[in-house]
Image (tube, rainbow, N blue to C red):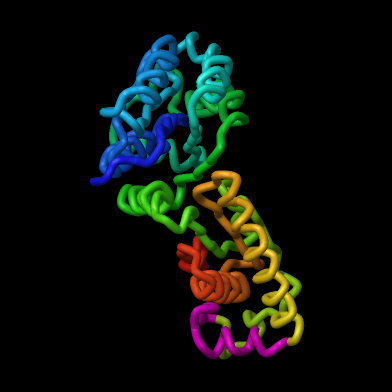
Amino acid sequence: MKAPRSPELVIITGLSGSGKGTVLKSLEDLGYYSVDNLPIELIPKFAELTGSSPQIRSAALVVDIREGEALRRFPTIFKQVKSHLPTKLIYLDADDATLVRRFSETRRPHPLKGGEKSVASSVKEERQLIEPIKKLADIVINTSRFNVHELREFIGERFGAARDESGILVSVTSFGFRHGVPTDADLVFDVRFLPNPNYIPEYKHLTGKHPKVAAYIRDFPQTQEFMAKITDLLTYLLPHYIEEGKSYLTISFGCTGGHHRSVMMAEDTRKRLAKAGFNVKASHRDIKKS
């Protein structure tokens, strides 16, 4: 695998059970020199080696609650390192119920669990302790709806394709507001103003990927006008993001349930941006939900 063109450090943090090990392994497979649970005090030296060594030009490491009290010093150290080397902080999150279920399935103890403390209370405590670090994150990924393979694929798309000559990987997603706004979205567009196919019996159980549903939504003048304006906006913004060094962008379209309007808009946006020459993929977070 070819080496990165410029030095880069990726720091992975987040809640226990959120998939930090999976992300670290995924980056290692992409050519990153990877270290798990490096002591806080050694991060500046590690960053220095990443920036100067021809053998380690791209690196990733995990910092989390296992650091104990030393974790309080991380924000200061992170800002120091970021001022000397291109550094990204990935924060992995997940719903409390998902984290509790994962610990139950793996039968591993939570790092904070002691005595009679439950996993649920440990998750809550950890979330409070690590919140100051979350505020520093460049990328927040909620892994609740990912399995291991999907998370690896997601990281591969973001950090692998982002190194191509196109300069930026665009991820266009659809979602339903009733299930919450994606935490990792850079741009969010609400398309609930468009006519809803859900109220037409023929279309209710289909999705926006179905030709009939997509044609129904496109047939309205406001859809055509909105699509044209969004395309103009994105083709204007993307070159500027590339110029500023942004290597990935997540664009999210939301409707009520995430089945029809948002799906159609995400698919059409993907096609238009691909036609314009951008590296773009589409995904649909809530398309399998009832």
- Left or right for 105, reference 227: left
Q: Residue at x 76, y 81 (%)?
A: 222
Let me know if residue 114 appears in the view: no
- Asked whether residue 219 is drawn in magenta, I would say yes
> Is residue 221 covered in magenta?
no
211 up-or-down from 144: above or below: below
Q: Position of residue 40 (x, y in %)?
A: 43, 13
For residue 166, above or below residue 194: above
Residue at (64%, 82%) from the top-left corner? 197
- Residue drawn at point x = 53 percent, y = 62 percent: 172
Which residues fall within the magenta stretch?
205-220
Establish if 25 lies above or below 111.
Answer: below
* Residue at horizontal 50 percent and vertical 79 percent from the top: 209
Which quadrant of the structure image shows residue 127?
top right
Q: Residue furthest left?
A: 1
Q: Position of residue 79 (x, y in %)?
A: 57, 21
222 or 246, which lies in front?
246
Where residue 90 appears, x then y in whole percent? 48, 36
Is 90 placed left or right of 35 in the picture? right
- Residue placed most toward the observer, 204 or 137: 137
Viewer-nearest residue: 98 or 19: 19
273 to 151, vertically: above or below: below
